Image (cartoon, coloured by chain):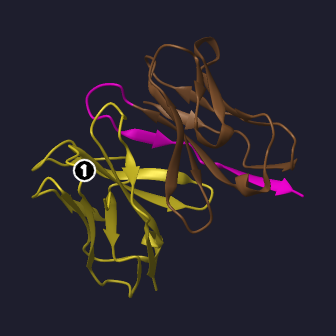
Chain colours: A brown, B yellow
Protein backbone atom coordinates (compact mmCIF):
# COMPACT_ATOMS: atom_id res chain seq x y z
CA UNK A 1 0.00 0.00 0.00
CA UNK A 2 1.17 3.49 -0.70
CA UNK A 3 2.12 5.78 2.17
CA UNK A 4 3.65 9.18 2.71
CA UNK A 5 5.86 10.26 5.60
CA UNK A 6 6.58 13.82 6.61
CA UNK A 7 8.99 13.37 9.49
CA UNK A 8 8.92 16.97 10.72
CA UNK A 9 5.70 18.00 12.46
CA UNK A 10 6.87 21.56 13.13
CA UNK A 11 9.64 23.63 11.60
CA UNK A 12 10.65 27.15 12.57
CA UNK A 13 12.85 29.32 10.39
CA UNK A 14 13.80 32.97 10.34
CA UNK A 15 12.54 35.18 7.57
CA UNK A 16 15.06 35.18 4.74
CA UNK A 17 16.51 31.81 5.67
CA UNK A 18 16.35 28.81 3.40
CA UNK A 19 13.79 26.06 3.89
CA UNK A 20 13.63 22.35 3.21
CA UNK A 21 10.61 20.22 4.08
CA UNK A 22 11.06 16.50 3.88
CA UNK A 23 8.78 13.95 2.28
CA UNK A 24 9.32 10.23 1.81
CA UNK A 25 6.91 7.89 0.12
CA UNK A 26 6.31 4.20 -0.27
CA UNK A 27 4.89 2.95 -3.55
CA UNK A 28 5.55 0.08 -5.91
CA UNK A 29 6.39 2.27 -8.87
CA UNK A 30 7.00 5.96 -9.39
CA UNK A 31 3.83 7.73 -8.29
CA UNK A 32 2.69 11.20 -9.03
CA UNK A 33 3.98 13.53 -6.31
CA UNK A 34 2.51 16.75 -5.02
CA UNK A 35 3.03 19.47 -2.48
CA UNK A 36 0.09 21.46 -1.14
CA UNK A 37 -0.04 24.43 1.22
CA UNK A 38 -2.83 25.23 3.63
CA UNK A 39 -3.19 28.53 5.43
CA UNK A 40 -5.20 28.55 8.67
CA UNK A 41 -8.90 28.02 8.06
CA UNK A 42 -8.38 27.66 4.34
CA UNK A 43 -8.48 24.89 1.78
CA UNK A 44 -5.48 23.35 0.08
CA UNK A 45 -3.54 25.03 -2.68
CA UNK A 46 -1.35 23.10 -5.07
CA UNK A 47 2.26 24.31 -4.96
CA UNK A 48 3.80 21.94 -7.46
CA UNK A 49 3.60 18.45 -8.89
CA UNK A 50 5.84 15.83 -10.42
CA UNK A 51 4.71 13.30 -12.99
CA UNK A 52 7.86 12.40 -14.90
CA UNK A 53 10.89 13.92 -16.60
CA UNK A 54 13.08 16.54 -14.98
CA UNK A 55 13.44 15.64 -11.33
CA UNK A 56 13.65 19.27 -10.21
CA UNK A 57 10.21 20.82 -10.31
CA UNK A 58 9.42 24.49 -10.05
CA UNK A 59 6.21 25.64 -8.40
CA UNK A 60 4.39 28.75 -7.38
CA UNK A 61 5.52 31.25 -4.74
CA UNK A 62 9.19 30.48 -5.38
CA UNK A 63 9.05 26.86 -4.21
CA UNK A 64 10.79 23.95 -5.85
CA UNK A 65 11.00 20.23 -5.14
CA UNK A 66 13.39 17.50 -6.14
CA UNK A 67 12.39 13.92 -6.81
CA UNK A 68 15.02 11.39 -5.79
CA UNK A 69 14.03 7.91 -6.83
CA UNK A 70 16.86 6.20 -4.94
CA UNK A 71 15.73 7.80 -1.69
CA UNK A 72 11.97 7.70 -2.39
CA UNK A 73 11.92 11.35 -1.49
CA UNK A 74 10.32 14.52 -2.78
CA UNK A 75 11.61 17.35 -0.60
CA UNK A 76 10.28 20.87 -0.89
CA UNK A 77 12.70 23.81 -0.86
CA UNK A 78 12.68 27.56 -0.90
CA UNK A 79 15.87 29.64 -0.90
CA UNK A 80 14.48 32.57 1.10
CA UNK A 81 11.39 32.28 3.26
CA UNK A 82 8.89 35.12 3.63
CA UNK A 83 6.65 35.67 6.66
CA UNK A 84 3.65 34.91 4.45
CA UNK A 85 4.93 31.37 3.93
CA UNK A 86 3.85 30.43 7.45
CA UNK A 87 1.30 27.67 6.90
CA UNK A 88 0.94 23.91 6.91
CA UNK A 89 2.47 21.95 4.08
CA UNK A 90 1.31 18.58 2.86
CA UNK A 91 3.08 16.12 0.63
CA UNK A 92 0.85 13.77 -1.35
CA UNK A 93 1.26 10.71 -3.52
CA UNK A 94 -1.06 10.03 -6.41
CA UNK A 95 -1.66 6.77 -8.21
CA UNK A 96 -0.52 7.20 -11.82
CA UNK A 97 -3.11 4.76 -13.13
CA UNK A 98 -6.49 3.45 -12.16
CA UNK A 99 -8.20 5.50 -9.52
CA UNK A 100 -5.78 8.44 -9.46
CA UNK A 101 -6.46 8.79 -5.75
CA UNK A 102 -4.17 10.75 -3.51
CA UNK A 103 -2.68 9.81 -0.15
CA UNK A 104 -1.46 12.64 2.03
CA UNK A 105 1.24 12.93 4.62
CA UNK A 106 0.44 14.22 8.08
CA UNK A 107 1.75 17.68 7.31
CA UNK A 108 4.52 20.02 8.46
CA UNK A 109 3.58 23.25 10.14
CA UNK A 110 5.96 26.07 9.25
CA UNK A 111 6.52 29.01 11.56
CA UNK A 112 8.46 32.01 10.31
CA UNK A 113 10.26 34.30 12.74
CA UNK A 114 10.52 37.97 11.85
CA UNK B 1 -15.67 29.82 -12.53
CA UNK B 2 -16.73 28.27 -9.20
CA UNK B 3 -14.42 25.21 -9.24
CA UNK B 4 -15.32 22.93 -6.32
CA UNK B 5 -18.08 24.10 -4.01
CA UNK B 6 -18.91 22.47 -0.69
CA UNK B 7 -22.06 23.03 1.31
CA UNK B 8 -22.54 23.67 4.14
CA UNK B 9 -19.39 25.35 5.41
CA UNK B 10 -20.18 24.76 9.08
CA UNK B 11 -22.52 22.41 10.91
CA UNK B 12 -23.13 21.25 14.44
CA UNK B 13 -24.89 17.91 14.89
CA UNK B 14 -26.07 16.01 17.88
CA UNK B 15 -24.93 12.41 18.29
CA UNK B 16 -27.17 10.13 16.27
CA UNK B 17 -28.37 12.77 13.84
CA UNK B 18 -27.87 12.38 10.12
CA UNK B 19 -26.72 14.81 7.47
CA UNK B 20 -25.45 15.06 3.93
CA UNK B 21 -22.53 17.10 2.71
CA UNK B 22 -22.68 18.22 -0.89
CA UNK B 23 -19.76 18.68 -3.22
CA UNK B 24 -20.32 20.20 -6.63
CA UNK B 25 -17.75 20.78 -9.36
CA UNK B 26 -18.19 22.61 -12.63
CA UNK B 27 -15.02 21.43 -14.38
CA UNK B 28 -16.46 18.23 -15.85
CA UNK B 29 -14.02 16.17 -13.80
CA UNK B 30 -14.40 12.40 -13.78
CA UNK B 31 -12.80 11.80 -10.40
CA UNK B 32 -14.06 13.07 -7.07
CA UNK B 33 -12.88 12.46 -3.53
CA UNK B 34 -13.91 13.04 0.06
CA UNK B 35 -11.26 13.56 2.74
CA UNK B 36 -11.36 14.31 6.41
CA UNK B 37 -8.69 16.37 8.10
CA UNK B 38 -7.84 15.95 11.76
CA UNK B 39 -4.99 17.56 13.71
CA UNK B 40 -1.75 15.63 13.36
CA UNK B 41 -3.27 13.14 10.94
CA UNK B 42 -3.25 15.02 7.67
CA UNK B 43 -5.96 14.27 5.16
CA UNK B 44 -7.40 10.79 5.06
CA UNK B 45 -9.42 9.50 2.15
CA UNK B 46 -12.97 8.50 3.07
CA UNK B 47 -14.52 7.56 -0.26
CA UNK B 48 -13.88 8.35 -3.86
CA UNK B 49 -15.51 8.06 -7.27
CA UNK B 50 -13.96 7.40 -10.66
CA UNK B 51 -17.05 8.37 -12.58
CA UNK B 52 -20.78 8.95 -12.49
CA UNK B 53 -22.57 6.10 -10.76
CA UNK B 54 -19.41 4.64 -9.20
CA UNK B 55 -18.03 4.88 -5.68
CA UNK B 56 -15.29 3.13 -3.74
CA UNK B 57 -13.97 3.02 -0.19
CA UNK B 58 -10.87 4.87 0.88
CA UNK B 59 -8.80 4.60 4.05
CA UNK B 60 -11.51 5.50 6.61
CA UNK B 61 -14.95 4.69 5.15
CA UNK B 62 -16.73 3.43 8.27
CA UNK B 63 -19.74 5.49 9.30
CA UNK B 64 -20.01 7.24 5.92
CA UNK B 65 -21.85 6.61 2.69
CA UNK B 66 -21.54 8.37 -0.64
CA UNK B 67 -23.38 8.73 -3.89
CA UNK B 68 -22.46 10.04 -7.34
CA UNK B 69 -25.73 10.15 -9.22
CA UNK B 70 -24.61 13.07 -11.35
CA UNK B 71 -21.13 13.63 -12.66
CA UNK B 72 -20.87 17.07 -11.12
CA UNK B 73 -22.04 16.11 -7.61
CA UNK B 74 -20.55 13.89 -4.94
CA UNK B 75 -22.54 13.51 -1.73
CA UNK B 76 -21.17 12.36 1.61
CA UNK B 77 -23.68 11.07 4.14
CA UNK B 78 -23.49 10.45 7.85
CA UNK B 79 -26.37 8.20 8.87
CA UNK B 80 -25.82 8.36 12.62
CA UNK B 81 -23.25 10.97 13.59
CA UNK B 82 -20.72 10.22 16.31
CA UNK B 83 -18.33 12.59 18.14
CA UNK B 84 -15.43 10.80 16.40
CA UNK B 85 -16.70 12.27 13.15
CA UNK B 86 -15.98 15.79 14.31
CA UNK B 87 -13.57 16.96 11.65
CA UNK B 88 -13.03 19.21 8.68
CA UNK B 89 -14.19 17.58 5.47
CA UNK B 90 -12.70 18.39 2.09
CA UNK B 91 -13.93 17.45 -1.31
CA UNK B 92 -11.57 17.29 -4.29
CA UNK B 93 -11.90 16.60 -7.97
CA UNK B 94 -9.58 15.68 -10.78
CA UNK B 95 -9.65 15.12 -14.50
CA UNK B 96 -7.35 12.17 -14.00
CA UNK B 97 -3.58 11.80 -13.82
CA UNK B 98 -3.54 14.58 -11.26
CA UNK B 99 -3.46 17.26 -13.90
CA UNK B 100 -6.29 19.45 -12.75
CA UNK B 101 -6.86 18.74 -9.12
CA UNK B 102 -9.01 21.18 -7.22
CA UNK B 103 -10.12 21.29 -3.60
CA UNK B 104 -13.20 22.74 -2.00
CA UNK B 105 -12.86 25.15 0.91
CA UNK B 106 -13.98 22.59 3.48
CA UNK B 107 -16.87 21.83 5.82
CA UNK B 108 -16.26 22.08 9.53
CA UNK B 109 -18.46 19.55 11.29
CA UNK B 110 -18.86 19.27 15.04
CA UNK B 111 -20.75 16.38 16.59
CA UNK B 112 -21.76 16.92 20.20
Q: Which residues are magenta?
A: A95-114
Name the residue located 65 percent from the left edge and 31 percent from the top edge. A64
Q: Is residue A94 left or right of residue A18?
A: left
Residue B26 drawn above or below residue A47: below
Q: Position of residue B90 (x, y in %)?
A: 41, 60
Q: Position of residue A25 (x, y in %)?
A: 56, 28
Q: Is residue B103 above or below residue B14?
A: above
What x and y, as percent, mark residue B97?
A: 33, 30
Q: Position of residue B20 (x, y in %)?
A: 25, 74
Q: In the structure shown, which secondary structural element does the residue marked by tag 1 occupy?
A: loop
Q: Residue at x 72, y 52 (%)?
A: A85
Total labels drawn = 1
Residue at screen point 72% across, 49% down = A9
> Does B8 sit left or right of A15 as displayed?
left
- Residue A40 visible, this orientation: yes
Which residue ends up furthest to the front in the rendered image? B1
Q: Which residue is mark 1?
A: B27
**The N terminus of chain B: image quadrant:** bottom left
Closest to the observer, A21 or A106: A21
Placement of B83 over or under B76, stated as above or below? below
Identify the residue shown where x is 58% and y is 35%: A59
* Residue B47 shown left or right of residue B36 in the figure: left
Q: Chain letter for mark 1, please.
A: B
Q: Is residue B9 left or right of residue A45?
A: left
Query: Residue A100 lies in magenta, yes or no?
Result: yes
Q: Is residue A28 magenta?
A: no
* Residue closer to the observer: B38 or B60: B38
- The quadrant in which residue B12 appears is bottom left
How crowded pointer 1 is (Cα within 10 Å; few <14, some 14-19, many 20+) is rated as: some
Amino acid sequence: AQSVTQPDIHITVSEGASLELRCNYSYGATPYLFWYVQSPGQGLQLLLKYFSGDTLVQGIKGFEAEFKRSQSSFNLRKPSVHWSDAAEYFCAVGEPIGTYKYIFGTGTRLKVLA
Amino acid sequence: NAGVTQTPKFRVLKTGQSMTLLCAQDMNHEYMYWYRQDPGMGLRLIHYSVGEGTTAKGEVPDGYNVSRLKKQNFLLGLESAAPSQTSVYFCASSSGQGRLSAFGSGTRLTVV
